[in-house]
Image: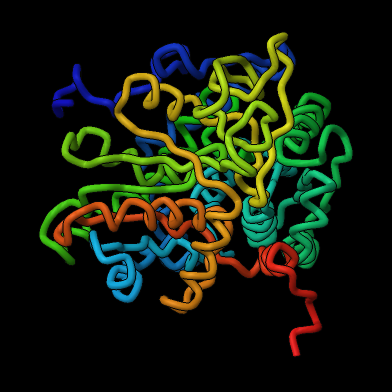
Amino acid sequence: MANDLFNSFMTGPDEQGRFGDFGGRFVSETLMPLILSLEEEYEKAKTDDSFWAEMNDLWTHYVGRPSPLYFAERLTDHLGGAKVYMKRDELNHTGAHKINNVLGQIILARRMGKTRIIAETGAGQHGVATATVCAKFGLKCVVYMGAHDVERQAPNVFRMRLLGAEVVPVTSGRGTLKDAMNDALRDWVTNVRDTFYCIGTVAGPHPYPAMVRDFQAIIGKEVREQMDAAEGRLPDTLVAAIGGGSNAMGLFFPFLDDKDVNIIGVEAGGKGVNAKMEHCASLTGGRPGVLHGNRTYLLQDDDGQILEGFSISAGLDYPGIGPEHAWLHEIGRAKYVSITDVEALEAFQLCCTLEGIIPALEPSHALAHVMKLAPTLPKDHIICMNMCGRGDKDIFTVAKALGFEMGNFG
């Protein structure tokens, strides 16, 4: 875990887009020219000062970065152990971390002369971020969203339509994130000339996993500086929720070579990691395979057919995980655990009542693990979790799960 070039965890992927045995490019011949063109454009942008100047200006003046690092004092006292800090990325414009990455991809799309942007979305936050940036730059926006998610994330669907996006409900499969991504890829193959596919997580064919990670790494870079200002040292433990894994990779990546920093990703355990696969914990309960252009851990049956995941959280309801996470899991640099729906709901409510912060269901999973972990650690141990989304979008889902009828709270 040394910091030199040959022992660094931060040098991947290789030229084939692989993180060890994971990642790569498994796409149709039709898409290869687009993928290679995107890779070329991003390689140019990485060393282009004008690209990063535009990104930094928008992150600062449009998104509202840096997002605060917040010491959760009442939660810390309640848990009676480690100090708990929250990286408040839910305070970004649009209410989540997703816009960090969307800005970068859409600036690239404009440089490539693309006028039509397509995206997939589960919880709706990536769709909202994409619709937002398309509105800012006057680009056509089409968002594919599973019909099941359209129902349970109604506020975000309305926001996307207000922003001028066309939202396409996907009825195949179980109507969730996997199915939305399938249809977005079909659209891209059909409309290669003018369309750019803005992927919302660290998945998909190379260069998407590394590119999305690089844009989201602003999260971890800020935490390093903010934690030094607050505590004079690095955190001891990082915790983040994982669906595809972009918010987690954004927090984790700048710390991969810091051997004394523990890294924990939290998957959606649904009703429990069991043989019925009523969960979305692909690292805990899956095995390697190929989906959406990359090789990674997936929920699949004995014949390799992809199974439908399950989670109360639309953003974590995906039967796979980003390939860099799969690699970190296999080499043991990061630890991955699962949290059930019941545990996430308990954390959601505790955060509301103790800290006055209504979290999204996604980071509620991370917080639920913090609630288990913090009491077992000494008071000078520092945990930093990523509060990657706000809970406005989830109030209907939570109300239903807790037995309340919206509009009948008197």
Report if residue 330 is visible in the image: yes
Q: Residue at x 55, y 26 (%)?
A: 285
Q: Nearer the viewer, residue 105 or 234?
A: 234
Q: Residue at x 51, y 40 (%)?
A: 267
User: x and y percent of residue 326 in the render?
Assistant: 45, 24
Would you place residue 220 above or below residue 154 in this image? above
Would you place residue 67 above or below residue 175 in this image? below
User: x and y percent of residue 129 in the render?
Assistant: 62, 56
The quarter in which the C terminus is drawn is bottom right
Q: Nearer the viewer, residue 220 or 287?
A: 287
Q: Residue at x 55, y 18 (%)?
A: 287
In the rendered image, the residue lying farthest to the right is: 171
The quarter in which the N terminus is drawn is top left
Would residue 137 appear left or right of 340 to someone viewing this image?
Answer: right
Would residue 312 appear left or right of 39 to someone viewing this image?
Answer: right
User: x and y percent of residue 209 in the render?
Assistant: 50, 30
Report if residue 111 is visible in the image: no
Would residue 48 appear left or right of 291 to someone viewing this image?
Answer: left
How many callouts does the rendering have? 0
Q: How is the image coloured?
A: rainbow
Residue 233: name its quadrant.
Answer: bottom left
Q: Residue at x 64, y 43 (%)?
A: 271
Q: Nearer the viewer, residue 370 or 91?
A: 370
In the rendered image, the residue lying farthest to the left is: 232
User: x and y percent of residue 377 in the render?
Assistant: 22, 53
In the rendered image, the residue lying farthest to the bottom is: 410
Residue 301: name its quadrant.
Answer: top right
Would you place residue 102 above or below residue 225 in this image? above
